[in-house]
Amino acid sequence: MSASSPKTSPNKNMPGNLKQDALAQLCAKLVAGLQEMGLQVTAEQQQKLLDYVGLIYKWNQVHNLTAVREPLDMVTLHILDSLSILPYINARYIECKRLLDVGAGAGLPSIPLAICLPELQVTAIDAVQKKVSFMRQAKAQLGLQNFNVIHGRIEAQRVPSKEMPEKFDVITSRAFSEIGLFVRLTRHLLADGGKWLAMKGVVPQQEFEKSGLYPAEIKVLKVAGLDAERHLIILE
């Protein structure tokens, strides 16, 4: 990981009522978590991740984007959890240039991935307007040129289109739906040789049996500070 850490001075994105020591705690928790998980993230990217936490916190006061209310918890449950799949989205493991995040909500895992993988073209889709508005605001404030946001239902999308000119190498979701429904609604958007990456808690054995779909691989995800089962279900 980068030896340098982000500055902890307040900025326009961070919650105004957080004191300097609280900002330092956020920074320290992020840095320690990334180190524990062995993730290579630059100081500039770390700062954008913290700015993103600040944006979620501010919007949550009015729009109730996520059930997680405290910024320190957001570092673990949103940022580090999303980045737990980072090692599986690179040229060494999966040849991925275009990624689609289905039911992205506040942009999880798509925005943390877009921050840390600037060469990856990331598209997020959600049917809830306030969440789409938030993601568009985050794109603008964080300067994410590689991030695209779509408002709509995934089954209504077509390729090629203005918003989806090409199919995707990877389609991911974070507790979007059952495996069978996730695959059925997105199959027409996956490129030849592409993969589905479904983030789950416990291994959803009943979902496999119900759908008749069985994973190519199941990876145990380690999230620093989270004492709960997390798995990545990889389907081809």
Image: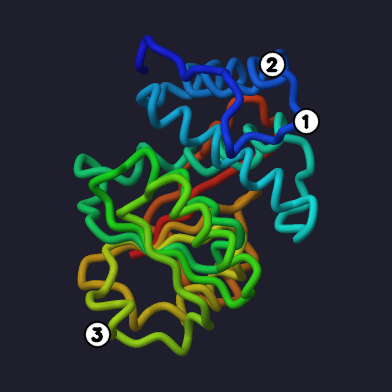
- Label ID, residue 160: 3
Q: Nearer the viewer, residue 235 or 122?
A: 122
Do the numbered discs 2 and 3 sit on residues whose CB atoms are within 8 Å?
no
Q: In this view, does 191 lie above or below 25?
A: below
| Amino acid of disc 1 | Asn
| Amino acid of disc 2 | Gln
Q: Horizontally, is 218 left or right of 24 in the view?
A: left
Q: Horizontally, is 127 left or right of 213 in the view?
A: right
- List x then y, in percent, for residue 214: 46, 65
* Number of marks in picture: 3
Q: What element carries label 3?
A: loop
**Which residue bears the numbered disc 1?**
17
Q: Which of marks 3 and 1 is nearer the N terminus?
A: 1
- List x then y, in percent, for residue 218: 46, 49
Q: Horizontally, is 49 left or right of 26 in the view?
A: left
Q: Nearer the viewer, residue 227 or 99?
A: 99
Q: Which of 224 and 203 is in front in this view?
A: 224
Residue 140 image-quadrant placement: bottom left
For the N terminus, the quadrant is top left
Q: In this view, does 121 lie above or below 31?
A: below
- Label ID, residue 180: none
**Which residue bears the numbered disc 2?**
20
Q: Which residue is drawn at 47% across and 48% down?
A: 141
Q: Earlier in the sequence, mark 2 or mark 3?
A: 2
Q: Badge 2: how crowded within 10 Å, few (<14), some, or many (20+)?
A: few
Q: Distance between the residues labelled 2 and 3?
A: 48 Å
